[in-house]
């Protein structure tokens, strides 16, 4: 209940953060119940958020609290026996880092990373023990065996959640402490990634590796990754972008969009392979894949194609044909955040030069109208993006009457619900 009060009051609770923190920290390793330890882990970043909102300029005080919270969380991890609670503790450190940005020196970052890498090793040993216990104690398919197996599988799923939480925390360090991640990057390339991507590697290890690779590229950029390391990362993304598992494909597809955004002049040498990989992912049939994850992987491929057009169209062999293909793949309807990004891209491009979006002779107008008829709602489009479309359609009646007439003609062909969306947003 106390955590809810802090979340609701935010800066209004700041004057009580000191005694509240003392209370929480006294319970961070409370042995009687893991629920209290879990709640404390969740609450510490909430306390920090309250302080930051109350006094944005008092960074010294924020860092003081953050250091105490981080030290306490890692000390608690050393004795924690419940993996679910460890997940909460790791995610708490990630949240603190993302809220405060760079506040640790390189030595502290290295120590933190070593602790997290050790947590992964211990987690792997627990998973192995679970697997061995199941194998050694099963005598058949009786009810006890089935229950034991289900329990051990669930335990290992939680271990996987813990390891992915650590990969996210590494990502937060890449984002905020770029200059202090040298040892972590070296350890990842020298020790973890070769094993996690090796023959026979478990799915969770491949997922961990791909998440880390994308975070490395996104937050460190090509400037902090040497040429051979990046070549290896790109080759890995290319390989798994064709994988039958949509979770792995989604990570790779997202990564290609990041390469377009941060790759600068380096992008051109990879452009053809990226376009080919994205098209392959977009056109892959559903088959026996999970439909939801398949759709998200496809949406990420479409969005990354849009990011290529947004940032790298000048180096494409045929940007017009690529834009034609991109428009045929829209709308994005499953990954709402990617839908919002691509709708904003369309709105900006339409404002800058309508023929980029609509075609030289407005041949794409029917498709664009169909897309907007489905996406002119806040689920898929931010209010600022809606305003950009409103401004464009409002001004063409006086600046381009021929286009305005075509818009009216296409509007009349839209389903009633699409017309209603146009009228409510663009009126």
Image (spheres, rainbow, N blue to C red):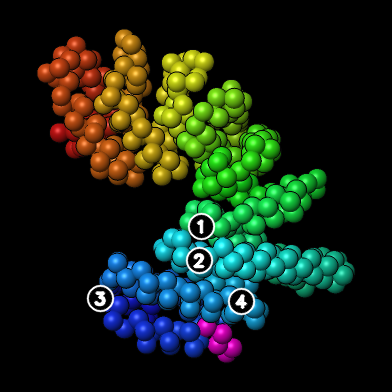
N-term-proximal mark, 2 vs 4: 4
Q: Residue at x 21, y 37 (%)?
A: 387
Note whether 230 is above or below 136 in the view shown: above
Please tell me how crowded label 2 is: few (under 14), some (14-19), or many (20+) other residues with Cα within 10 Å: some
The percent coordinates of residue 225 (x first, y second) are 61, 43
Q: Which residues are magenta?
A: 28-33
Q: Earlier in the sequence, mark 1 or mark 2?
A: 2
Helix, strand or loop under label 2: loop
Residue 123 pos. (x, y %): 71, 67
Q: Where is residue 269, by image quadrant?
A: top right
In-image side of 8 versus 22 (left or right): left
Q: Residue at x 56, y 81 (%)?
A: 34
In 3D space, how far apart are the residues under numbered discs 4 and 3 (Cα atoms)?
31 Å
Circle nearer the N terminus (4, 3): 3
Q: Position of residue 170 (x, y in %)?
A: 57, 58
Mark 3: secondary structure: helix
Mark 2 lies on residue? 104
Q: Residues within 10 Å of mark 4 (few under 14, many from 20)?
A: many
Residue at image coords 37%, 72%: 60
Who is closer to the viewer here, 177 or 31?
Answer: 177
Give the labeled residue for mark 3: 12
């Amino acid at each position: 209940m106390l955590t809810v009060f802090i979340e609701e009051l935010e800066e209004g609770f700041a004057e009580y953060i000191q005694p509240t923190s003392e209370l929480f920290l006294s319970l961070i390793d409370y042995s009687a119940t893991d629920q209290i330890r879990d709640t404390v882990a969740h609450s510490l970043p909430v306390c920090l958020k309250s302080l930051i909102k109350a006094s944005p300029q008092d960074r010294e005080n924020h860092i003081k609290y953050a250091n105490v919270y981080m030290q306490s969380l890692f000390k608690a991890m050393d004795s924690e026996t419940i993996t679910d609670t460890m997940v909460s503790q790791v995610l708490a450190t990630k949240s603190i880092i993302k809220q405060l940005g760079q506040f640790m020196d390189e030595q502290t970052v290295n120590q933190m990373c070593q602790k997290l890498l050790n947590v992964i090793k211990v987690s792997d040993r627990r998973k192995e023990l679970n697997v061995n216990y199941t194998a050694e104690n099963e005598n058949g398919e009786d009810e006890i065996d089935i229950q034991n197996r289900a329990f051990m599988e669930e335990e290992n799923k939680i271990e996987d959640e813990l390891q992915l939480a650590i990969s996210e925390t590494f990502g937060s360090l890449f984002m905020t402490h770029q200059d202090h991640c040298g040892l972590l990057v070296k350890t990842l390339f020298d020790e973890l990634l070769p094993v996690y991507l090796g023959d026979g590697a478990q799915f969770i290890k491949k997922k961990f590796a791909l998440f880390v690779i994308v975070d490395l590229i996104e937050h460190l950029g090509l400037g902090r990754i040497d040429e051979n390391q990046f070549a290896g990362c790109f080759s890995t993304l290319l390989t798994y972008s064709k994988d039958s598992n949509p979770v792995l494909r989604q990570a790779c597809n997202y990564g290609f969009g990041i390469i377009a955004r941060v790759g600068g002049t380096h992008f051109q040498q990879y452009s053809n392979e990226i376009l080919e990989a994205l098209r392959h992912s977009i056109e892959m049939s559903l088959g026996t894949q999970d439909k939801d994850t398949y759709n998200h992987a496809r949406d990420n491929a479409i969005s990354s194609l849009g990011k290529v057009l947004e940032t790298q169209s000048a180096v494409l062999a045929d940007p017009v044909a690529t834009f034609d293909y991109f428009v045929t793949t829209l709308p994005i309807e499953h990954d709402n955040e990617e839908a919002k990004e691509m709708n904003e891209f369309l709105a900006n491009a339409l404002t800058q030069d309508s023929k980029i979006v609509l075609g030289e002779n407005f041949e794409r107008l029917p498709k664009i109208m169909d897309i907007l008829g489905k996406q002119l709602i806040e689920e898929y489009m931010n209010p600022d993006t809606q305003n950009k479309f409103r401004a464009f359609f409002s001004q063409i009646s006086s600046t381009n009457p021929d286009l305005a007439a075509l818009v009216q003609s296409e509007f009349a062909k839209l389903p009633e619900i699409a017309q209603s969306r146009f009228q409510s947003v663009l009126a």
